[in-house]
Image (cartoon, rainbow, N blue to C red):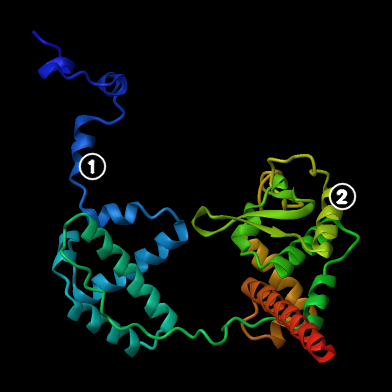
Amino acid sequence: MPSLWTISKVTYPPFFRFGLTARGLTAAEFQGLADVPPELEWFANIANAKTRRAYRQDVADFTSFVGITRPEEFRIVTRAHLIAWRKDLERRELAPSTIRRKLAALSSLFDHLCEQNAITHNPVNGVKRPKANNNEGLTPALGDAQARALLDAPPANTLKGQRDRAILATLLYHGLRREELCKLRVRDLQQREGVLHLRIEGKGEKIRFVPVAAKAARLVKEYLEVAGHGDDLQGPLFRPVKNNSTGTLNKPLNPASVYQEVVRRYGQQVGINADVHGFCVHSLRATAATNALEQIKQIRFCKFDQSSSVLRIK
């Protein structure tokens, strides 16, 4: 009797033959996954936990509004359903950015259904979305004096104070998100063409390199010297200074603690919390962006001024 792998004189590759002897899924599990609706497949394939959580809420909002109870019912949704939902979101006075995100979540789902040939077109296409406010950011940036006061707030003679100064400088000068800061490892301080850079893992696992500001580099170096983990290249850059529950210090900080115990704590101490409505970690990111734009303007002005001088000399 011919072997299963040589029927019709077809020779299957070794990895395919190996699959039958080292199966990871049972036949029932294999069939169960084959029967997963594409709607659920789309959700399971969202890698970022925060995006998955936000999209879950957005899709749940829509299903509650239109009365969908089964995944397959998404395939009969029309543009009219989505326009009615958008009008309900506007009636609830949700922020334009929130409405845009909710529509983007549904659009992503319907794009996936199109790819799977479950529907013929994306009903979100053509649904008018609120205009984004691109003229001015909504997150307040700090002034120079406020930024200096915040940087000077942590005590310089304690390990926690030196760590917190390094954290605030990293946020203020480089515009990191708090999750990005907590992901930093000692090895992410890298020399590139003679300049110290931060290797930052951002959203979507995208890597970017940012030159380290001189003051931030000094504060981080001082912190590492006192903390004593500068040679632990694989370990987290910023770590707890105490852990009353397990005693483990070789672990990254929690993004929530960066917000509460560093940014908000020192903001309260120097009066920024009261003076700057909506002050948060993103305010430090906005400050970094604002300063970068100002530097670009100054460079352009200098170039213009030099050109003007040359023209006058001629």
Q: Can residue 59 be seen by looking at this rendering?
A: no
Horizontal relation, residue 257 to residue 14: left or right: right
In-front residue for pair 69/229: 229
Report crowding for label 1: few under 14, some 14 to 19, many 20 or more residues within 10 A (C-alpha).
Answer: few
Using the rendered view, name the quadrant where residue 216 is placed: bottom right
Q: Is residue 234 visible?
A: yes
Q: Secondary structure at mark 2?
A: helix
Task: From this view, report whether residue 207 is shown above or below residue 229.
Answer: below
Where is 195 relative to 173, above or below? above
Q: Amino acid at mark 1?
A: Leu
Q: Which quadrant, please, contains the C terminus?
A: bottom right
Q: Is residue 33 above or below residue 207?
A: above
The local crowd at label 2, few if under 14, some if 14 to 19, many if 20 or more residues have their Cα within 10 Å, is few
The residue that mark 2 highlights is 226
Q: Is residue 251 above or below residue 149?
A: above
Q: Residue at x 18, y 45 (%)?
A: 35
Relative to 90, 285 lies left or right: right
Give the residue at the far top of this rendering. 1
Q: How far apart are the two marked residues, 1 and 2, measured between alpha carbons?
A: 52 Å
Residue at image position (75%, 80%) is 303
Q: Earlier in the sequence, mark 1 or mark 2?
A: 1
Question: In the rendered view of the protein, which quadrant contains the N terminus?
Answer: top left
Q: Is residue 275 left or right of residue 154?
A: left
What number of labels is visible?
2
Q: Splitting the image into 4 quarters, where does residue 46 fall?
A: bottom left
Which residue lies at the image location 25% right of the left edge and 65% below the top edge?
Answer: 110
